[in-house]
Amino acid sequence: MNFQKICVIGLGYIGLPTASTFAAHGIKVLGVDINSQIIETINQGKIHIHEPGLLEEVQKAVQSGNFKAATKPEEADAFIIAVPTPFQANQFGEYNGLTYKLADMRAVTSAAESIVPFLKKGNLVVLESTSPPRTTVDLVAPILARSGLVAGRDFHLAYSPERVLPGQIMRELIENARVIGGVTPESAQAGSDLYATFVKGQIIQTDATTAEMVKLMENTYRDVNIAIANEFSRLADKFGVDVWEAISLANLHPRVKILNPGPGVGGHCISVDPWFFVESAPELTPLIYHARKVNDAQPHFVVKLVQRALGSLNGKRIAALGLAYKPDVDDLRESPANEVVEILGHEGAQVKAWEPFKPDANMPGIDMASSLEDALKDADAIVLLVKHTEFSKLNPVEIAKKTKARIVIDTVNGWNKEAWKNAGFTLFHLGDGKSFIIHPSHLPRTASAG
Ligand code: SAJ
């Protein structure tokens, strides 16, 4: 199939890179978003999100005349839907007394509705938004049928999941393998023809529901595996074992690859997508449900660890290092580090947080430090929450000069226990029961000591 003009609906982290990459490869692209400010920004050749390489691509695309943005779609050969699918804020599902989160599909619904007046015979529609299984056939196809045209007979309809990693989107968009699931084999072929415009990775055709499941399975697999690592950290803590040592030894087995425990699972993908399976079939997903619960509870486990290390949290001044949802990114949304800081505050600690990737962030309820020194200055303890490369490189001897704090809680295995001990610190690692056994304040109390 030949594509002269396409409409990309939703100009966020996925839609804008996708739209500008198509335009840079010679296709006329109309980018559509409900936010008129975003439209204005893009038509001026500027961008509203941070992603390396995106600004250059958008500027090139706008200057070439191939890329325009508007608030409404127009007739085109193909339509791509790349809108957010967050949680519903106040509605939860319930099964056997267990509550679970529900996907908010309103943006997908209205994007599909906006296409209806412009849909023509022979068009292609592709859904890219991460969605519960069967969304393409059960939600999108019936909406598009309001045009009088039938998916798979009069026009092509496909689902193609996005699997790019934030920070590397522009490269991964082109190089990653791409799965295209059609409601018919012809729809999958049409989708392949479209993405072959720029995708250099393998393009694999399947059916729409398989493609939806593939995306959810990838992120659920990772979530469940992080949950078991987090549960191992709790067991090791209880049994006086260092979980990091135990994991590295278990991983010597040729068929074992345990992931890293940490303060929890953040971001908008891995902590969200498994719920789409749970919502679609709560009776079939006890493992996925409980893995989510384990990871969601991990910030509370970290707070208990800090409390044990300090004896009490009340009035303690804590320097929290890192607020991003994972190392070396500037994205602070859905971050377990934020949650740890908030809970520490509720428990009576005075926390000052330092995030070098977003020093000016305005986080409600969080006292942001203006520098590492500012965070450390009056601290009683240091808590490492994100393994940013620049934190891993900190020299404990230098840190000792900047703070009176001598207790350090490392939740990500970023620091070497011996080096910090030699510099005069007592360092507690998450999941390291050994550090508590040797710490004098945690020896069992004698009867005389009360
Ligand atoms: N994390 C751990 N332990 C680990 C690995 C990660 O606690 O061993 C935590 C991180 O700190 C972070 C969270 O998990 O809080 C998620 O980070 P991540 O790097 O695992 O994943 P994301 O959310 O940045 O991106 C994922 C990727 N999916 C997979 O690796 C299967 C990416 O390829 C997807 O495109 C993206 O989700 C998405 O958009 O769905």
Image (cartoon, rainbow, N blue to C red):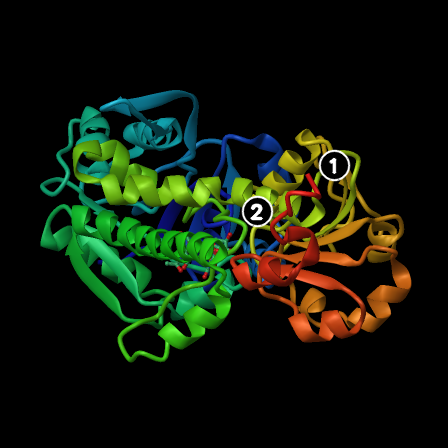
Q: Is residue 402 above or below residue 309?
A: below
What is the secondary structure assignment of the residue under circle 2?
helix
Indicate the amino acid at tag 1: Ala
User: Looking at the image, do the residues carrying marks 1 and 2 touch, with CB atoms under 8 Å apart?
Assistant: no
Depth check, front residue: 399 or 330: 399
Identify the residue at horizontal 82%, vertical 46% (top origin).
Answer: 369
Q: Is residue 287 left or right of residue 240?
A: left
- Sequence-first tag of 1 and 2: 2
Q: Ligand 1: does it lie within 8 Å of the C-beta at label 2? A: no
Q: Is residue 278 above or below residue 215?
A: above
Question: Looking at the image, in which quadrant does ligand 1 appear?
Answer: bottom left
Depth check, front residue: 248 or 158: 248
Q: Position of residue 348 (x, y in %)?
A: 72, 31
Q: Position of residue 345 (x, y in %)?
A: 70, 34
Q: Position of residue 297 (x, y in %)?
A: 47, 40
- The label on residue 442 is none
Circle 1 residue: 349
Task: Give the quarter of the figure containing the N terminus.
Answer: bottom left
Q: Position of residue 175 (x, y in %)?
A: 40, 71
What is the secondary structure assignment of the residue under circle 1?
loop
Identify the residue at horizontal 78%, vertical 40% (top origin).
Answer: 316
Q: Quadrant for residue 311, please give it.
A: top right
Q: CA distance from mark 1 to mark 2?
A: 14 Å
Q: Quadrant for residue 393, please give it.
A: bottom right
- The label on residue 302 is 2
Task: Give the quarter of the figure containing the C terminus.
Answer: top right
